[in-house]
Image: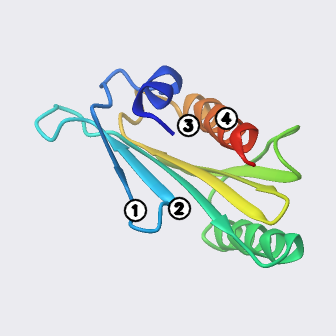
Amino acid sequence: MPLPDVQAKSPFQTPLVASKSSDDKQACTYSSAEDSGDQVSIVVLATDYATAKKARAALDDARQAAVDHGLPLSRIDDLGDSSFAWGVDEVFVEAVAGDRLISATLQGEWPDTTDDAKIAAGTELVRTVISRLP
């Protein structure tokens, strides 16, 4: 996703100024300047699975890991086939769309940028990725 699209949805006061794709093009990290007072980042990841059932199993595993670590979970309606958010400061929004698991991870500016604001922004980022899937 182009940096301007992510900047437009970012909940952070600190601007995102850089983006870097993983070698396999499944993940992209968007970050603030290294010399900014408060480091922030957003990671968008799209993972393909052999089947929708395996993608859903990966989502279920992530949900169970959050529960096992005692992290708060939030249900998200109308995002992909199934979705939820979890975390404190580092907030994850995860959704299954067919045989793909899409996630957005937002971190930084806590508590000034609330977890709820990160969930809302992450939801819109994941929704945008899903809308652009072939």
Name the residue furthest front. Answer: 134
Give the residue at x 86% y 69%. 52
Q: Left or right: 100 with respect to 120? A: right
Q: Position of residue 44 (x, y in %)?
A: 52, 50
Q: Position of residue 131 (x, y in %)?
A: 75, 37
Q: Is residue 130 above or below residue 36?
A: below
The kind of residue on which mark 1 rests is Ser
Give the residue at x 60% y 70%. 69
Name the residue tied to disc 3.
Answer: 115
Name the residue tied to disc 4.
Answer: 128
- Foreground of the two, 9 or 76: 9
- Foreground of the two, 95 or 133: 133
Q: Earlier in the sequence, mark 2 or mark 4?
A: 2
- Foreground of the two, 89 or 39: 39
The kind of residue on which mark 2 rests is Gln
The kind of residue on which mark 3 rests is Asp
Name the residue tied to disc 1.
Answer: 22
SS assignment at label 4 = helix
Confirm or deny contact between disc 3 and disc 4 (CB under 8 A): no
Name the residue furthest left. Answer: 35
* Spatial CA span between label 2 and label 3: 25 Å
Confirm or deny contact between disc 2 and disc 3 (CB under 8 A): no
Residue 84 — which label? none
Residue 26 — which label? 2
* Spatial CA span between label 3 and label 4: 20 Å
